[in-house]
Image (cartoon, rainbow, N blue to C red):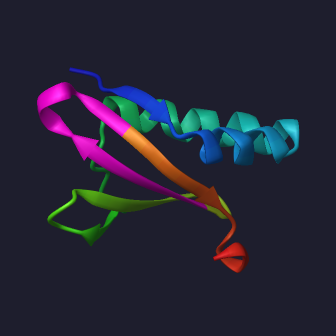
Amino acid sequence: MSYKIQLVDSSTQQIINFDPKVQQQIIAKLDELAINPLPEDAKILEEDNSLYLFQANRYRIVYQIKDKASLITVAKIAHPQDY
């Protein structure tokens, strides 16, 4: 079962601002999350809100899993220095 990926407006803007090579890498990682929303290297940030952190090369993806809706909402995509 695959999940649908939903980007909040700010994360969409973050992807647009990356160079095309980084955009492709991020999109590939999002595709991986759609298939497996809890990869081994995902870290839980907030258990109550199902909020997770996933490393995508040099960037971090913060996302929320909604199992009942089979939905992953991407809240933030940024380089660690931008936190």
**Measured from the top left, where is residue 38 in percent x and y?**
27, 49
Height in image: 46 above or below 40? below
Q: Which residues are magenta?
A: 60-72
- Where is residue 68, by image quadrant? top left
**Measured from the top left, where is residue 57 in percent x and y?**
64, 58
In the picture provided, is 68 more to the left or to the right than 58? left
Height in image: 72 above or below 51? above
Residue at 17% across, 67% down: 47
Residue at 22% across, 56% down: 50
In the picture provided, is 3 more to the left or to the right than 58? left
43 or 69, which is in the foreground? 69
Secondary structure, magenta segment, majority class: strand
Total of numbered circles in the picture? 0
The quadrant of the picture occupied by the N terminus is top left
In the picture provided, is 19 more to the left or to the right than 74? right
Residue at 66% across, 61% down: 78
